[in-house]
Image (cartoon, rainbow, N blue to C red):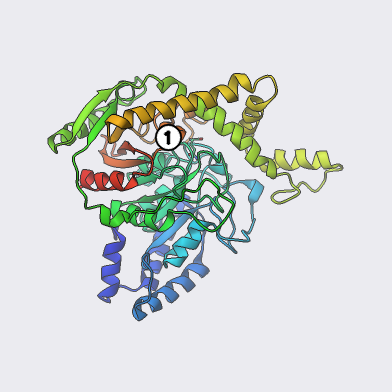
């Protein structure tokens, strides 16, 4: 059980002088110590968090504190924070200190959140179980023999085990939603471009989005409001200029929705029967609540995982070419020539899964194969996007599972990359189409493991998605 369930609760306690921010931080430090075996944190920012907590407490007392005063938050270890190490859980960046802060970190600090540390993840966010981390897997608090999901596994566990109130993850093909699902939390992937990627270590730039993992919809709405919107930097030219709605206020807008269930996802043989029956129960509840639920066909399901892995590995092979042992990151000291320096530094610095993806990405982009793979996958992505747009002409929300199974055993999928990739089948759809999507908890299975359901909305309709989620969970 979490001690504090939302920022509102904490802010009330602080304003009634029943709690101070430094005491709250001390509580979370203790929780981190007690849960060390879960390996959620790559580093706890003891010093800077304490300085911040004292300063924000002062601001609260002076009545000048920002919206997030009282929020103790962890950040995935691929998000840059000036003067702090950022590694993407890779040997390649071990000990690398970020010279600047990402837009998301700047915005958290501007609104007086306290950043408690950087969280374990799959190496360069490539994975679905947190097992590709150079620093070892994070573990699920529901059962430490199981994975927490990935790639933002540490972020999900930190919230699950009450080591911070909320966490930021990044979601390229499910990395916020699936770990949130495995750990019984709420995971939101905003519309592509809703949040600036400035200062977020790139994996696949046309997919990457930062998203919050929280235990309340209110906190997700508040964080999105703070993080979303264009910044002053030229770096992320894809960040949207659309105005940012007041998500927390709009949570109260309760409407009846037209919901489409993707038939092929619910009928998929890969879907665990306990998840299926929990989702069917949710569907009955939605109908009873006055929503219209219709089963629709989505015949492109089999193309999602191949298109996703061709496009993301292609982008990754390009993005990761910067780690060459010269500019920054791990460098081999014995190399006798420039070429050797590149080869040895990259061979030593990257883990197996990252290498697999660089190889695959380089292959699909190479002359002679480009048309057959990369270009084809781009065309398929366009079809998927169009299909989604057509569905959203008739429906407000799309319902599907998040993952085909609940959390699995550490090591179980590690020997077979394809099994791991196929597990992304339901989360990569909104990633390919750019739509916002959320994972919401729907109870536990017989073994006590969290189960989850996914809702996807029209581009930039996070307000609707969050308001619906609020009602769904209450
Ligand atoms: N599991 C997916 C992958 O490995 C998603 C990762 C992510 O969203 N960062 O690509």
Who is closer to the viewer here, 53 or 392?
A: 392
Q: In which quarter of the image is the N terminus?
A: bottom left
Numbered disc 1: secondary structure: loop
Query: How far from the left and from the top, in percent, is residue 294?
Result: 22, 26
Residue 110 as seen in the image, left or right of residue 102 = left
Who is closer to the viewer here, 1 or 145?
A: 1
Image-quadrant location for residue 409: top left
Image-quadrant location for residue 276: top left
Residue 387 as seen in the image, left or right of residue 395 = right
Query: How far from the left and from the top, in percent, is residue 343?
Result: 76, 38
> At x 38% / y 36%, what residue is drawn?
407
Q: Name the residue under label 1.
A: 409
* Figure check: 189 above or below 416: below
Image-quadrant location for residue 102: bottom right
Q: Cβ of disc 1 within 8 Å of ligand 1?
A: no
- The reply to whether residue 1 is visible in this rendering is no
* Figure check: 68 above or below 417: below
* Figure check: 425 above or below 178: above
Residue 307 as seen in the image, left or right of residue 324 = left
Q: How many labels does the image show?
A: 1
């Amino acid at each position: 059980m979490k001690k504090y369930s939302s920022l509102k609760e904490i802010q009330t306690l602080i304003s009634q002088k029943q709690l101070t921010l430094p005491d709250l931080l001390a509580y979370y430090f203790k929780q981190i110590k007690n849960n060390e075996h879960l390996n959620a944190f790559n580093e706890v920012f003891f010093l800077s968090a304490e300085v911040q907590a004292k300063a924000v407490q002062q601001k609260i007392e002076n009545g000048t504190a920002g919206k997030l005063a009282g929020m103790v938050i962890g950040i995935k270890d691929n998000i840059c924070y000036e003067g702090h190490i950022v590694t993407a859980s890779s040997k390649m960046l071990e000990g690398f200190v970020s010279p600047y802060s990402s837009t998301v970190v700047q915005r958290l600090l501007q609104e007086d959140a306290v950043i408690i540390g950087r969280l374990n993840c799959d190496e360069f966010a490539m994975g679905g179980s947190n097992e590709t981390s150079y620093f070892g897997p994070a573990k699920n608090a529901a059962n430490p023999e199981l994975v927490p999901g990935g790639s933002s596994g540490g972020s999900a566990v930190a919230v699950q085990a009450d080591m911070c109130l909320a966490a930021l993850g990044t979601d390229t093909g499910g990395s916020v939603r699936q770990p949130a699902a495995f750990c019984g939390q709420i995971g939101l992937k905003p519309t592509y471009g809703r949040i600036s990627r400035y200062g977020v270590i790139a994996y696949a730039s046309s997919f990457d989005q930062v998203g919050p993992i929280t235990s309340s919809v209110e906190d997700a709405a508040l964080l999105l409001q703070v993080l979303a919107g264009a910044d002053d930097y030229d770096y992320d030219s894809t960040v949207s200029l659309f105005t940012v709605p007041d998500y927390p206020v709009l949570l109260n807008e309760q409407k009846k929705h037209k919901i489409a269930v993707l038939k092929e996802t619910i009928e998929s043989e890969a879907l665990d029967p306990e998840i299926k029956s929990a989702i069917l129960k949710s569907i009955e509840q939605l109908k009873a609540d006055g929503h219209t639920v219709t089963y629709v066909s989505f015949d492109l399901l089999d193309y999602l995982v191949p298109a996703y892995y061709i496009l993301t590995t292609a982008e990754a092979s390009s993005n990761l070419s910067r780690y060459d042992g010269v500019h920054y990151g791990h460098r081999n000291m014995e190399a006798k020539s420039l070429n050797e320096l590149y080869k040895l530094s990259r061979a030593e610095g990257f883990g197996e899964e990252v290498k697999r993806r660089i190889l695959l990405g380089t292959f699909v982009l190479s002359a002679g194969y480009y048309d057959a793979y990369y270009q084809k996958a781009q065309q398929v992505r366009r079809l998927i996007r169009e299909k989604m747009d057509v569905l959203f002409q008739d429906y407000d929300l799309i319902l599907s599972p998040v993952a085909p199974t609940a959390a699995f055993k550490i090591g179980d999928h590690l020997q077979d990359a394809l099994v791991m990739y196929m597990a992304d089948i339901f989360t990569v759809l909104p990633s390919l189409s750019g739509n916002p999507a959320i994972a919401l908890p729907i109870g536990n299975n017989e073994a006590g493991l969290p189960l989850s359901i996914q809702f996807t909305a029209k581009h930039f309709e996070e307000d609707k998605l969050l308001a619906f989620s609020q009602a769904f969970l209450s």
